[in-house]
Amino acid sequence: MSSTPIHCDVLVIGGGAAGVAAASAAGRAGARAVLLERYGFLGGLATAAQVGTICGLYLRDTAGAEAVPVAAGFAQEFASQLQHITGSKPIQLPTGLWVLPYSPPAFARVADATVSASGNINVILHATVSAARAEGARINEVRALAWNEPLIFAPKTVVDCTGEATSAALAGASVENGATDQAPALVFVLENVDPGLIQRGLIEMRRELRRGVESGALPALCERLSFVPGTGSNGRLALKLSLAAGSADLPLWQQVTAWERQSRALVGQLHRFLVANVAACRNAQLDSIAPQLGVRSGRRIQGRARLADEDVLGARKFDRGIARGAWPMERWGAAPKPEMTFFAERDYYDILLDCLRPVELDNTWVAGRCLSAAAGAMTSARVIGTALATGWAAGTAAAFQAQGRPLDEAVAEIRRQMNQ
Ligand SMILES: Cc1cc2nc3c(=O)[nH]c(=O)nc-3n(C[C@H](O)[C@H](O)[C@H](O)COP(=O)(O)OP(=O)(O)OC[C@H]3O[C@@H](n4cnc5c(N)ncnc54)[C@H](O)[C@@H]3O)c2cc1C
């Protein structure tokens, strides 16, 4: 067992959308980067929870016939690579929002290829961070178990992309718990579903689920079923089962264990019910259940700036904005559909670099769904397109900082790339 510290410029923790972007940014800026990911594949919720569409890449436009990118830069490059290998195209929803459907294995492959092509990045999979120590305002030691071997890292800078602000919290930074803000959901895929079901807007499925719940054959949660846009027309239908939001009284690890087990059991029950009661599902097979429950909202930092609900709804711009949000607020509560709160069409809001910086730590950045935001603002800023953008910004800032370059230069460089 080795206890020799591994030195690096930038340590990126978590290989979801934000972490892939952060590591790529650090590598391309010439930093020696390490990317740690607890699973055996990259992508985070985009792959492990199989969420199925990238939101936040394009401006909302009810009149426009083409998807217009919210900004140039890494997120668009990543989306282009996905489109290139899968042939997928953006689709427009009735609200004027555009999403890019993707297959989770393709997302993981593009993430692998992008990180590999981005410079000097040491990717360590199956590596779970369990300790982070700060001296003064700097994290100077991070510990992980990599395939059950203990490793120690001595980074110059850290980018926390765990979705739960894990290393920032372990190092003593102030965090807030968002687990009760939104309902989690489990994605599963049915094969051999009559494509007519999706064309009819799942009407008979919803009707039968209602009957099932009213008669007591199904638990009430089973009505909280929605579909992943872009699926169903070829007989392969991806569905999301939303659970009840978390309770503040239970620790999250306990809650997640209960959710995972409860939702998998419910999916089995739902599948049997749909086969027996919905003609379009008579031959449906349960193809897959996402390996991980989708937790929409977790722990996030208290940053030097905080993205407010008014910033999102007012499409507020900043001279030093480093990422753009294009998705409305989308809150998943007890109803089968989310509550959407839109801002103006063809518009976006800016996110400040200080939203990615914990109050107490100087050499540490966060990105993705653990940035500093009010609960409402987070329901917008968490989407994959925005997570790619904040990840890129955090990775660039961390690399510049590790190289002793001024942060103003990092901000200028990120803004130049967004406007290309
Ligand atoms: C059910 C559901 C549906 C959604 N639908 C959509 C959608 O259609 N479109 C969209 O754009 N967004 C959607 N979202 C939101 C979006 O998927 C996430 O907010 C986004 O993927 C978050 O990216 P991230 O990189 O910040 O975090 P994550 O994807 O959570 O990545 C965090 C990574 O860190 C790793 N990690 C965590 N802890 C550690 C540790 N201690 N050590 C090492 N690694 C660690 C994890 O394994 C993971 O890979 C959905 C979310 C859910 C839950």
Image (tube, grey):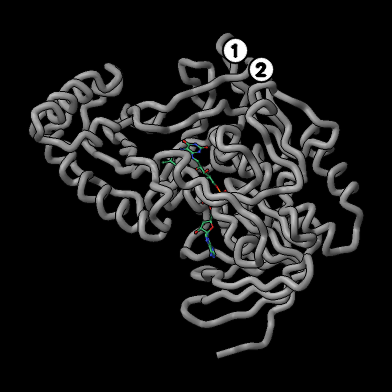
Structural distance between the alpha carbons of marks 1 and 2 = 9 Å
Q: Secondary structure at mark 1?
A: loop
x 73%, y 61%: residue: 119
The residue shown at (64%, 73%) is: 142
Q: Does residue 158 appear to the left or right of 340 in the view shown?
A: right
Res 9 label: none
Dot 1 or dot 2, earlier in sequence: 1
* Residue at image mark 1: 64
**Is residue 117 something that shows in the picture?**
no
Q: Is residue 203 above or below residue 308?
A: above
Mark 1 or 2: the one toward you: 2
Residue 150: image quadrant is bottom right
- Toward which corner of the image does residue 325 lie, by quadrant? top right
Residue corresponding to mark 2: 346
Residue name at image x 40 percent, y 39 percent = 183
Residue 322, compared with residue 205, is above or below; it is: below
The count of marks equals: 2
Amino acid tagged 2: Arg
Specify the farthest residue to the bottom: 1
Coordinates of residue 139 in the picture (x, y in percent): 72, 69
Identify whether 119 is placed above or below 67. Answer: below
Query: Looking at the image, is 302 positioned above or below residue 340?
Result: below
- Do we see residue 262 in this rendering? yes
Front-most of residues 289 and 195: 289
Q: Position of residue 265 (x, y in %)?
A: 20, 50
Dots 1 and 2: beta carbons under 8 Å?
yes
Considering the numbered disc 2 on the image, is that residue within a helix, a strand or a loop? loop
Q: Quadrant of residue 233?
A: top left
Q: Please state, as top left, top right, bottom left or bottom right, where the C terminus lies in the image.
A: top right
Label 1 C-beta lies within 8 Å of the nearest ligand 1 atom: no
Q: Amino acid at mark 1?
A: Gly
